[in-house]
Image (cartoon, grey):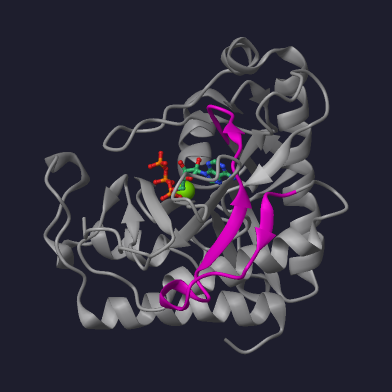
Amino acid sequence: MTNPLEIPGFAHVYSGKVRDLYAPLAADGTVVADRLMLVASDRMSAYDWVLETPIPDKGAVLTRLSLWWFDQLKDLVPNHVVSTEVPDVVAGRAVIVRKLEMLKVEAIARAYLTGGGLEEYRATGSVCGVHLPEGLEDGSRLPEPVFTPTTKAPVGEHDLPMTPAEVAAELGADTAAEVSELTRAILARGNEIAAERGILIADTKVEFGREPGAPAGRGGLVLADEVLTPDSSRFWPADRWQPGRTQPSYDKQYVRDWLTSPESGWSKASGEAPPPLPEAVVAGTRAKYVEAYERLTGESF
Ligand code: ATP
Ligand code: MG
C-alpha cells in the first residue's frame, strides 16, 4: 500500500483498504478528539485484496456520491458529515466528520438476490435466517429487503456472515433491531430515488456509529463511512434487468469478473495477490463509476 500523504495540520491515524483517516491538529499541535478527516483514495479492493492498480478519480466519485446520498437520506438518518472544507491536496475526495464509536457490524441489506446471498439461498432456501420463496434466480427481486450482516474483519481477514443472534449478542437486541430496520430503510429509500434515474440498487453495505458516551439502546445511531456508492453497493441498469443471469452493472463487479476470468490468470483460491489491472479494465471501471455518479445525481462529474 502507498504511504499516506503528509498533510500539514493533520496527523495520519489509520488506513483502511480505501480510506486514509487523519486527526485534525489544534493550533497547539494537540489532536482534536471529536473530529476525523476521511480521505478516499483511488485504491480499489476486491475479494478483500487491495489491488496494486488505482482507478483514477475513484476517491472523488465515492466522496461526492456519498455526500449527495447523505443529503438525500438526512430525514431518515443523521450522518457523520461536518464539513467539506479540507486542504487543497485532498480537495474533492475528503470530508471532515464526527469521530464516532463504530459498531462492529457491516450492515448489509439486499433487495435483489445475487452473489453471496444467492449462494446461501441455493444451499439452504433462506438468507441470514430469512426464509425465501422457491424458484428465485440470479437477480430476482426479493419480496422485501433482507438484512444480511457480516463481521467487520481486520485488514487481511474476510468478513463473515452473522446470524441474528450473533448481531444481538454484539450490539444488544435494541440496537440490533434498529440497525436492521435502518439499513433496510436506507436501501428501500435509495431504490425509490434510484428508480427515477433508471438504476436498481441490488444490495448495499453501510456502517453506523455512535457519539462517544451516547447511551446504548434505541436512538443515537449515526450513518458513517460511505453510503450507496459503487464500492459499497451493486447498481444495475433497470432497463437491462433480467433475472436468471448475471446483471450488467455500474460497480466493482466488472473488476471482480475480470479478476476471475481466464484472462487474468488469477484464482481466488490461490491465496496470492491479484495481478495488475490492464489499462482497458481501469478505463472501463472509471467510466462505470462516473456513470453511476452522473446518472444518480444528474450532475456531470
Ligand atoms: P477496514 O477499516 O476494516 O479496513 P475498509 O477497508 O472498508 O475497512 P475504509 O473504507 O478504507 O475501510 O476505511 C474507513 C474506515 O473508517 C473504516 O474502518 C470505517 O469504519 C471508519 N470510519 C468511517 N466513518 C467513521 C467515523 N465517522 N468515525 C470513526 N470511524 C469511521
Ligand atoms: Mg469501507
Q: Position of residue 268 (x, y in %)?
A: 21, 45
Query: Which picture quadrant has residue 219?
Result: top right
Q: How many marks?
A: 0
Residue 124 location, x and y as percent? 52, 23
Q: Residue at x 28, y 70 (%)?
A: 54
Magenta-colored stretch includes residue 111:
no
* Viewport quadrant of the N terminus: bottom left
Whether 49 is drawn above or below 213: the answer is below
Give the magenta range: 79-106
Q: Nearer the viewer, residue 274 or 132?
A: 274
Can residue 277 be seen?
yes
Residue 101 percent across, percent down from the top left: 59, 31
Compared to residue 209, the image places residue 44 above or below, namely: below
Q: Residue at x 45, y 69 (%)?
A: 59
The image quarter in which residue 72 lies: bottom right
Q: Is residue 87 magenta?
A: yes
Task: Say which residue appears at 16% left-offset and 64% top-offset.
Answer: 264
Farthest residue toward the front?
A: 28
Q: Is residue 73 left or right of residue 126?
A: right
